[in-house]
Amino acid sequence: MNKKGFTLIEILIALTVFAILATLTSSSLYYAFTARTRVNAQADRLNNLQLAVSLIEQDTIQIVDRPIRSNEMRLFSMLVGMPDYVEFTRDGYINPNSIDKRSSLKRVALVCLDKKLVRRTWESLDSKDRNAYGDRILLDNLTDCHFNYLNHTLQLLTKWREQTAQPNQSMELFPKAIQVNVTLQEWGEMNLLFIIPEGLYAPSK
C-alpha cells in the first residue's frame, strides 16, 4: 500500500506563499484603516469649521449699539477690534417666556489664543468681574490667526475703535464687516468675511 504525503520542500513553498499573502493582506488592511482614519479626521475638521463659521455669523449679524460697563464702572465700546481680539454686544440671546431674569443682549469676544480661535462670553452684559468668562474653542491647530475690519471706503484696517475715522472721512460706529483670517495646518489660509448689518446699512456720522 502506497502512502502519499507532502514533502518538506512542498511544505516550505506553501508556508512561503502563505507568508507573502499574509504580508500583502495586512499591508492592504493597514493602508485601508489609515485612509479611513484620515478621512474621518478631515470630516471632523470640516464639521468644526462649518460650526465655527455658523456661530460667528450668528454673532456678527446681531451686533447692536450697546456699550457696557464693567470693573469700577469702566466703559467699554459696543465694539472693540484689535488684530487678535474683537469684542462686541449682540442681540438675540434667547430667553423663552422670560424664564431667566436677564437681557436678550450678550457680550461676546473672538480671541486668537495659543494657536486657537476662541469664542468668549460673559454671563451678564455689564459684568462686575471681567475675568468671569467662559471660553469655547472654535478652531485649533492654527499657524496664524488675526482680524481685519472693513470700513465704508472698503479699506481693511488692523484695528477698530468706536467712531474710528481716517483723514477726510466721516466717523463710523461699526465696520461694514469683520474679516477673520486663519491658517489651518491641513488646508492653508482662509479669509472669512462676516457682514455687520449695523455697519453696512447705517449712515456714517
Image: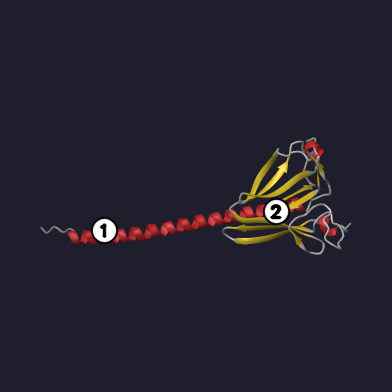
Residue lying at 70% horizontally and 40% vertically, measured from the top left:
133
Q: Residue furthest front?
A: 167
Residue at the image point whose x is 13% and y is 57% from the top: 3
Quadrant position of residue 143? bottom right
Q: Is residue 135 above or below residue 151?
A: above
Task: Tell me where residue 79 appears, x and y as whole percent.
Answer: 79, 50
- The residue singled out by tag 1 in the image is 15
The earlier-in-sequence mark between 2 and 1 is: 1
Quadrant showing the N terminus: bottom left
Near mark 2 (Cα within 10 A), the count class, few <14, some 14-19 or many ≥20, is few
Residue at the spot of label 2: 54
Tell which tag, 2 or 1, sits nearer the viewer.
2
Q: Amino acid at mark 2?
A: Ser
Whole-percent x and y of residue 196? Answer: 79, 56
Q: Residue furthest left?
A: 1
Q: Amino acid at mark 1?
A: Leu
Mark pair 2, 1: CA separation:
58 Å
Is 167 situated left or right of 11 in this image?
A: right
**Residue 172: % across, % down:** 84, 56
